[in-house]
Image (cartoon, helix red, strand yellow):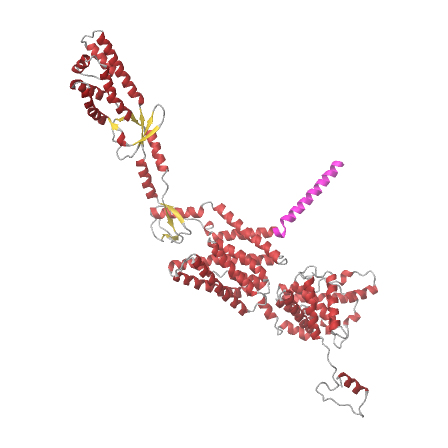
Amino acid sequence: MRRLKYLSLFRSQLNNIKTRYLKGIYSVSFFRSISAILVGLLMAFVLYPNFLMPIKHYHLGDIAERDIKASRDFLVQDKATTEKRQRQAQERAPLVYNLDEKKWSIIRKRIGQAFKEMREASRDGMKPDKNIKQHFEETLGIEISDRQFSLLKKEKFAPYIEASIYQLLEPIFRQGIVRSKSRLRKKTSIIIRFGKTGKEKASSPEDIISLTEARRKVDRLSYTLYKNMNRDLAETVRIICQSLLQPNLVYNPIETQREKEIAISSVKPVFYQVKKGEMLVREGEKIGQEQLAKLEAEQRATTQQPSILLLGVTLLIAGLIIISEKVATLVQKRFLKTWQDHLFWLALILFFFIFGQIGLGIGNLLSRNFHIFSSVSFAYALPLAAGAMLVTSFTEPKLGIVFGVLLSALAALLLKSHAIIFIYFLIGSWWAALRLGYCRPRNRLIKVGVEVGILQIFLIIAYHLLNQELDIWQLTKNIVLGGLSGPIASLITLGLIPLIEMVFDYTSDIKLLELANLDQPLLKELMVKAPGTYHHSVIVSELVEAAAEEIGANPLLAKVAGYYHDIGKIKKPLYFVENQIGVENKHDNLSPSLSALILISHIKDGVDMAKQYRLGRRIIDIIEQHHGTSLITYFYQKAKEQDENVSETEFRYPGPKPQTKEAGLVMLADAVEAACRSLVDPNPARIEAMVQKVITNIFLDGQLDACELTLKDLHKIAERFTKILTGIFHQRIEYPEGGPSRPYVIPTKEGTGEKNKAYTKHIGA
C-alpha cells in the first residue's frame, strides 16, 4: 500500500511537471521567440539568396548560360603567376651536398703510411725492386712512373716531400671537390652538410671546385714548391697530388628535393581582387581558364561554411527583433499583448528589409547600366524612415523611435557598411517619429517627410566633410538621392496606412480624423435615434480631448472614442434616461436584474456596431472598457431591497477595466457628465464637488488599476473637467413669457402682480 501511495504521488508530480513544461512551451513568449527566429531565417535568405538557388558548376570549355556578376568583393588566385613564382623559387632552392670528411683522412693516412714504409726501407738498404715500387703504389693508391719513384727514392722519401703533398691537398679537400659543376649552373647557393656532426653550411657555387678545377689549382700551387726542391721533384709531387685528388662532395637528391618543397611552400599564392558587380562571364561566352578561376572563387565565397553563416545571421536578426519587442513592451505595456500587434511588428520589419534589398538591387542594376550614379549612392535613397512613420501613425512616437533603432541596425547589416549608415537612418527615423506626434493629418505626413529629406541632406554633407570627400559631382548626386528619400517615405506611409488598417484592423490618426467628422453615418443615426445620448457623447468628447492634452494622452483618439463610446444605445435608446424626454420610463415595469441586463447589453451592441462600421480595434477596446467592471448601483440597491441575497456580480459590467489612458478618460468623463447633468443647481462649487466625488469613487472602486493614470493625472483631469462643465452648465437668467426678444415692461401701479415682481427681481430692476 505504501508503495502504491508513493507511486501515485510520483505520477501526480510528474503530471504537474509535464503540465508546467507544456504551458511553458506553448506560452506566448515562446511562440514570439519562434516567430522571431523564423523571420530572422527568412531575412537571412533575403540577405544571402545564394543559399536557396542551386549553383551551376561550370567546367573548362563550357558555354555560359547567363551573365554572371560578382555578388561581393572577393579574391581570385592567379595560378599562372603563382606557379611561375613557385618555379622560380624551386630553381633558386639550394642544392644539398654531403661532405665526405673521411675521404681526406683516408688519403692522408695512406700518404703517411706509404712514405713511412719507404723511409724505413731506405734505412735498411732498399734495393731497386719492382715489388717495392708496387707496394708503394698499392699503399698510396695511385700509379707513378719509375723515374718519379727513383726521384723519391733518391730523396729517401723525405718528410718535407710528404709535408708538401699535405700542403697542396688539404685546403682543396677542405674546400670540397665535386665531380662536375653542371648542376651548379644558375644556382645562387648550395648547402654543404658535414657527415660527422650533421651540421649544415650555406655556400656559394663559386666556393666549390670541380675535379678539373682542383687539378688546375694544384698546378698553380705547385710553383711554391720550387723554393724547397728541384724542378723534377716538384713536378713529381704535383703529379702525385693530382693523382690523389678525388671528389668528396656528394649530391644528395632527397634533401635537395626537400629544399625545393620548402621553397615552393614558402611562396604565397598571388591573388587579384574582383569587385562586387564585376562581370565574370557573359552569356554565350566560352569558359576559359581565367573565367573558370573567377567562377570557382565566386562559388567558394558564396558557399563557404553556409550553415554557420546562415545560423549566425539568423540568430543576430532574431536577437535584434526579440530585444526590440522587449523594449517596446517597456515603453508601452499594452503593445504586443496580442498576435495582431506582434504580426504587425514582424510584417513591417520583413517588408522594409525586403524593400531595402530590392531597392539596392535596382540601384546596382542602374549603376552598372548608367554610370551617373554609384551603387553606394542609392543607399541614401532608401526611404526607411517610413517604418518609424507607420509605427508612430498606429501607436505612439516612443514606439516609432524603438522601431527606428531596429530598422537602422538592420539597414547597416543589409548594406554591410560602417556606422555612418546606421546614424543616417537612425536620425531620420527619430526625427520622423518625434515630429509626427499625435493628431496627424495627411499634409502633416508630407511636411515631416520633407523635413526628413532636408535633415538627411545635412547628414550627407557632414559625412563628406568629415571624410574630406570634396567631389562636388558625387556630393550633389548623394544630396539629390538623400533629399528624395524623405518625401518618398511619406508617400509610402500614406499608401500603406489604408492597407494596414484593413489587414490588421488598426485605426490610424488619419482615419480618426475622418471618424471625428460629425457627418459620419453612425453619428447621424445616433443623433436621430438617441439625441440625448448624442448630446452626452459630444460633451464627453470635449471633456476627454481637453484632459488628454493635459496628461499627454492621444487627444484625437480620446475625442473620437468619446463620440462613439455609447453607440450601442442606438438599439434600445428609450431604456436610457437621457433619451426619455416626455415618455414613460420603461424600467418601471421591469425587474432590476432585467434592467441591469439591458444597460449592460449596450456594451456588446456597441462593439458589434463598431465592428460593422470598421471603427478599428482602438475604438472597440474603449467601447468595451469605458464602464470597466463598475456596479449599476441604482438597480443593485433596488434588487437588494427585494432580496438581500442578490449577487453583486449580476449588476456589474463585464469589463475589462480600462487598459489605456484614453479608455480611463472616457470612463471618467462618461460618469462625470451624467452626474453633473443630474445636479439641480449646477453652480461651480457643486460641479467641482461632484467631479471630485465621481473620480474618487471610480478610483476607490479599482476601475483605474489597469490603465496608466496617476494621481497627478487625476488631479489635472478633475481641474479640466470642472472648468469645461462649469462653462457648459453655467447659470442663465429666466426670461419672461415672451422670451428674450420681447420688450421689457416697466411695472406701473396698475400692473403690480406677483408675476411682475418676480420678473423685475430677476432682471435686477
Residue 416 location in percent, x, y? Answer: 46, 53
Residue drawn at x 25%, y 11% is 117
Q: Position of residue 634 (x, y in %)?
A: 78, 67
Left or right, 548 with respect to 63, comes to right
Visible residue check, residue 66: no
Say above or below: 635 vs 72. Answer: below
Q: Quadrant of the N terminus?
A: top right
Above or below, comparing residue 592 to residue 409 in the picture? below
**Is residue 551 found inside the magenta-colored segment of the image?**
no
Q: Which residues are magenta?
A: 1-29
Q: Is residue 573 left or right of residue 475?
A: right
Name the spot of residue 726 as percent of width and height, x first. 71, 73
Residue 105 as seen in the image, left or right of residue 634: left
Magenta stretch: helix, strand or loop mostly: helix
Residue 4 part of the magenta segment? yes
Q: Give the image location of residue 443, x and y in percent.
A: 53, 70
177 or 573: nearer the eye? 177
Count of numbered circles in the view = 0
